[in-house]
């Protein structure tokens, strides 16, 4: 399997594993809080609030003017309703009071509030549900379930004059308000949300989600904290309405909600539209009500649907990762992440809440994993290249191979102009017969070390050792300058080195040992040759064979070259023409030359010798 296919295979395996891990994390709820935060940032941006929906706040200004809330709550609300409804032509369509009046208190105050609510029959009040758990028996044992423990409702006289809806605020697992219960099942009856009851009073029917059987929904916040009230410092204060500072004509035909706007009344919550400034409960009801009035319902996929959506996006990202160019691949992933962010925002406007963090961050994780894998494979490839070529080429050539990568080698094979050198030890057989085996190996290793050092010194590649012979290649695997000259110079260096080594070997044996060397140049096939079990990087072809035949013709201490080598270097080397000779395996005789040395200008020339 070539390196490209291997990379594709590992990309696929890694992408599959990462996708499975991401889906498992999503199914387990890991990073659920972060997902919700990202959805808030994308979806909850606030909108224009309706001009027919107002919030009158029981605020600090009201407390300062009228005193402790408990002392005037029923008379104050009664007076507010009376002022708003004093002219039926200019009265609000609905007055929703988000204040609990859960028991009889003072008969006179109770009667005043009930009579005010009965004036135009346009008042909606709130109830409050307390939940608990009960143990129920099933066919396989027992389990616990949530149930309504208590239902606090307005006192009887007020309940008879108003519609009532529960005012409970639902918190998500991270303590933020994003969802609303439309209905809940009580003891033998269905309880409806406060905002739903106001909607019913205003529109004459229950809102669409309730008619469709939905029990809860996502809140698309239109207003931020204080938007329906006016402003934090100068809003629709209850005291300003009571004293006539705010004309009641402002609320004609509209919906008016009345509720707490004082921190001491303990009715504020952090919401998806603003996590830093709490929103009072009555404004949350106003946002729910606006969504119902605008038909701005948001459908949320269940867990299975959410995971399928995430899987589809991540599979698309996985396909992008197969783009070979890393820059294009990165741009594709970035485009996918950006497109999903803006696309999900557009889909949200059309009624669907799609997951964001897992698809977007998942794309980033896949790309990061891809980068890491490429880095690891690159490191592994470099180590493999160093392992393969480190013993055959000089360090600077290995560095060049590593720098350019495997593709520089074209391991499938290529035709290339190269220089080939063969060197064989003359007189080694008689020497090996006269020495003990361990000394034979020592002598052979010293001669092979000499040939290797000479090849490396001239930037060649030691292709292989064949018994007591060495094959070297130049201009492969990387392109080189002046490679033909370097091959010839290698031969001369070997002859010189052999004479010095022979003096050292005089201490071991009196037999004479030297090199016979052949050099040829021309086109050959270079690449990985072999099978899946055994391969080597080498050169094959007539150019290689001719170099081997020249070496077999060389006597001890001779460097023989072919005519192509001579033609390229004739101005740089001293030679003796040996005439034409028959080379084994060649149909025609060849003119060969013996190199005597280098010309002075040849030793310092920068020509490439081609």
Image: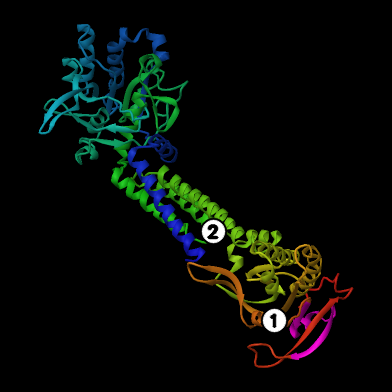
Which of 316/554 is in front?
A: 554
Label 1 sits on residue: 552
Residue 506: x, y in percent?
Answer: 79, 65
Extreme residue in the bottom direction: 588
Report the mark closest to the observer, 1 or 2. 1
Which residue is pictured at 63% across the width and 59% down the height? 402
Q: Reply yes or no: does residue 567 show up in magenta.
A: yes
The part of the image, by quadrant, that contains residue 398 is bottom right
**Range of magenta residues:** 558-580
Q: Is residue 228 left or right of residue 416?
A: left
Q: Reply yes or no: does residue 145 show up in magenta.
A: no
The part of the image, by quadrant, that contains residue 544 is bottom right
Whichever of labels 1 and 2 marks the residue nearer the N terminus, that label is 2
Extreme residue in the right direction: 600
Residue 350: x, y in percent?
Answer: 35, 47
Query: Mark 1, residues whose alpha carbon is within 10 Å: few (<14), some, or many (≥20)?
Result: some
Q: Is residue 103 left or right of residue 18?
A: left
Which residue is pictured at 39% across the width and 45% down the height? 22
Q: Is residue 144 above or below residue 372?
A: above
Which residue is pictured at 55% across the width and 57% down the height? 326
Q: Is residue 51 above or below residue 536?
A: above
Residue 550: x, y in percent?
Answer: 71, 82
Would you say residue 550 is visible in this rendering?
yes
Element on which disc 1 rests: helix
Q: Which dot marks residue 328?
A: 2
Q: Is residue 233 above or below residue 559?
A: above
Q: Is residue 483 left or right of residue 179?
A: right
Query: Mark 2, residues whose alpha carbon is within 10 Å: few (<14), some, or many (≥20)?
Result: few
Would you say residue 47 is visible in this rendering?
no
């Amino acid at each position: 399997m070539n390196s490209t296919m291997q990379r594709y295979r590992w990309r696929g395996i890694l992408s599959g594993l990462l996708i499975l891990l991401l889906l498992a994390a999503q199914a387990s709820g890991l990073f659920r809080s972060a997902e919700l935060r990202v959805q808030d940032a994308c979806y909850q941006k606030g909108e224009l609030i309706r001009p027919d929906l107002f919030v009158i706040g029981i605020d600090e200004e009201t407390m300062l003017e009228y005193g402790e809330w408990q002392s005037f709550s029923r008379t104050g609300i009664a007076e507010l309703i009376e002022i708003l409804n004093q002219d039926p032509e200019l009265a609000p369509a609905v007055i929703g009071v988000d204040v609990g009046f859960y028991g009889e208190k003072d008969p006179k105050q109770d009667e005043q509030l009930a009579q005010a609510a009965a004036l135009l029959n346009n008042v909606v009040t709130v109830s409050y549900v307390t939940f608990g758990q009960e143990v129920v028996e099933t066919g396989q044992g027992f389990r616990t379930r949530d149930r309504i423990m208590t239902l606090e409702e307005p006192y009887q006289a007020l309940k008879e004059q108003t519609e009532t809806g529960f005012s409970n605020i639902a918190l998500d697992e991270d303590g933020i308000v994003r969802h609303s219960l439309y209905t809940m099942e009580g003891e033998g009856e269905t309880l409806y949300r406060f905002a739903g009851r106001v909607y019913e009073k205003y529109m004459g029917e229950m809102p669409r989600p309730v008619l469709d059987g939905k029990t809860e929904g996502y809140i698309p916040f239109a207003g931020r904290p204080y938007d329906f009230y006016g402003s934090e410092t100068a809003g629709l204060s209850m005291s300003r309405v009571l004293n006539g500072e705010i004309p009641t004509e402002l609320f004609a035909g509209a919906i008016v909600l009345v509720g707490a706007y004082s921190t001491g009344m303990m009715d504020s919550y952090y919401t998806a539209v603003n996590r830093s400034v709490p929103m009072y409960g009555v404004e949350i009801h106003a946002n729910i009500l606006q969504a119902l009035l605008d038909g701005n319902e948001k459908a949320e996929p269940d867990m299975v649907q959410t995971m399928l959506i995430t899987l589809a996006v991540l599979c698309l990202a996985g396909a992008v990762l197969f783009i070979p160019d890393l820059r294009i691949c990165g741009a594709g992933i970035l485009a996918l992440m950006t497109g999903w962010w803006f696309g999900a925002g557009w889909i949200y406007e059309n009624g669907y809440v799609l997951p964001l963090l897992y698809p977007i961050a998942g794309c980033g994780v896949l790309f990061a994993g891809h980068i890491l894998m490429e880095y690891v494979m690159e490191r592994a490839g470099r180590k493999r290249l160093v392992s393969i070529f480190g013993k055959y080429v000089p360090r600077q050539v290995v560095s060049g191979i590593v720098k350019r990568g495997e593709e520089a080698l074209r391991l499938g094979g290529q035709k290339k102009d190269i220089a080939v050198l063969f060197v064989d030890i003359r007189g080694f057989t008689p020497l090996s017969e006269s020495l003990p085996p361990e000394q034979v190996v020592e002598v052979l290793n010293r001669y092979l070390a000499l040939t290797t050092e000479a090849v490396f010194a001239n930037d060649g590649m030691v292709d292989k050792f064949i018994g007591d012979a060495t094959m070297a290649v130049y201009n492969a695997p990387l392109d080189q300058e002046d490679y033909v000259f370097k091959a010839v110079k290698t031969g001369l260096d070997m002859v010189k080195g052999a004479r010095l080594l022979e003096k050292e070997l005089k201490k071991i044996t009196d037999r004479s040992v030297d090199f016979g060397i052949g050099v040829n140049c021309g086109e050959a096939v270079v690449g990985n040759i072999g099978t899946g079990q055994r391969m080597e990087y080498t050169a094959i072809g007539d150019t290689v064979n001719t170099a081997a035949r020249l070496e077999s013709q060389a006597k001890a201490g001779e460097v023989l070259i072919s005519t192509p080598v001579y033609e390229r270097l004739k101005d740089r080397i001293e030679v003796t023409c040996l005439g034409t000779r028959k080379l084994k395996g060649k149909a025609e005789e060849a003119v060969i030359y013996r190199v005597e040395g280098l010309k002075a200008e040849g030793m310092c020339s920068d020509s490439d010798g081609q």
